[in-house]
Image: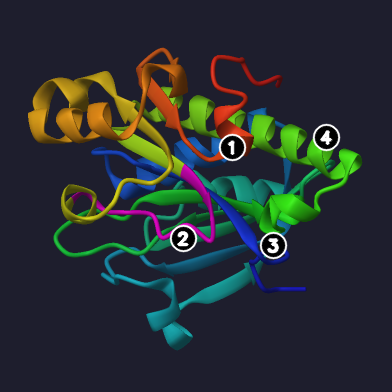
Amino acid sequence: MTELYPDPPHLLVGLYDDSSETETFAAVCRVAGELGCEPAGHVAVVPTELDFDWISDLGAARDVRAVTTAGHTALCDGADPELRAIQARFSHRQLGTVVVEYLPKEAPDRHPVGIAMSAAVLGLPETIWTGSDRKAAGLLVDRAKTFLEAAVTECGALYGGIGVELRFPTPRQLAKEPLPTELFVSQRLLDSDKSLADRVATTFTDDNVTRWKTGSFYASWAPFASSVGQRASR
């Protein structure tokens, strides 16, 4: 299997950082490794200087390479000056396939970076969940929050979010579109963008906020809102 996609539907953990895209991608890959993800043999690369908005637009310019564990780590770390890793496949004992990838951007914004995994039971209506489904959903929520908290802390990201088939917003989109229902906003962004701070304050109640090291996580979808204030287990 050479395609770099988890089983659908996808649960996406995304973040936007104002560091370089390659540094952010490398940092998120390191976080994935620290949280139990093992390199799983394939990395998609493009020429370093190639500009693009959507991975789906790349066509033959996107080269999926079968690599050793050492090669996987080297490409993710940006060790090859002529190539840029844009997707990296990992395997997690509980989550299965996990993919770190560039998310779509809107020029002149940078690419956000995402961690994609199967949404599993979170992709089903809550009305049909069984007791075991609710337990599985709780474990997946904890994992997703742990990935997001670790990644935004490691990168010093401006903002991040979690969602099933989430269309993760670039800064321009964040300013004009509805906020994700599961949203992290750094304190430095809240301090510098009063308009966003006001929108967050009117969208989420204090009961739906968890304070993290570099900002706050806001949640309004029941599986996540019910776990607000609880620290996810790593």
Disc 2/disc 4 C-alpha distance (Å): 33 Å
Estimate the x, y position of residue 99 in percent, counting from the top left: 61, 55
Q: Which residue is mark 1?
A: 222
Q: Earlier in the sequence, mark 1 or mark 2?
A: 2
Q: Closer to the camera: disc 4 or disc 1?
A: 1
Disc 3/disc 4 C-alpha distance (Å): 21 Å
Q: Which residue is mark 4?
A: 135
Mark 4 neighbour class, 10 Å CA radius: few under 14, some 14 to 19, many 20 or more: few
> Residue at (55%, 30%) from the top-left corner?
225
Q: Earlier in the sequence, mark 3 or mark 1?
A: 3
Q: Closer to the camera: disc 3 or disc 4?
A: 4
Q: Earlier in the sequence, mark 3 or mark 2?
A: 3
- Residue type highlighted by circle 2: Ile
Disc 3 is placed on an element classified as loop
Q: Which residue is mark 2?
A: 86
Mark 3 neighbour class, 10 Å CA radius: few under 14, some 14 to 19, many 20 or more: many
Which quadrant of the view contains residue 213? top left
Any magenta on residue 163? yes
Disc 4 is placed on an element classified as helix
Estimate the x, y position of residue 156 in percent, counting from the top left: 34, 26
State the residue in front, 79 or 60: 60
Disc 1/disc 2 C-alpha distance (Å): 32 Å
Magenta range = 162-171
Check the image and report above or below for 148 versus 133.
above
Q: Which numbered disc covers residue 47?
A: none
- Residue type highlighted by circle 4: Lys
> Residue at (38%, 54%) from the top-left corner?
168
The answer to whether any part of residue 98 appears in the image is: no
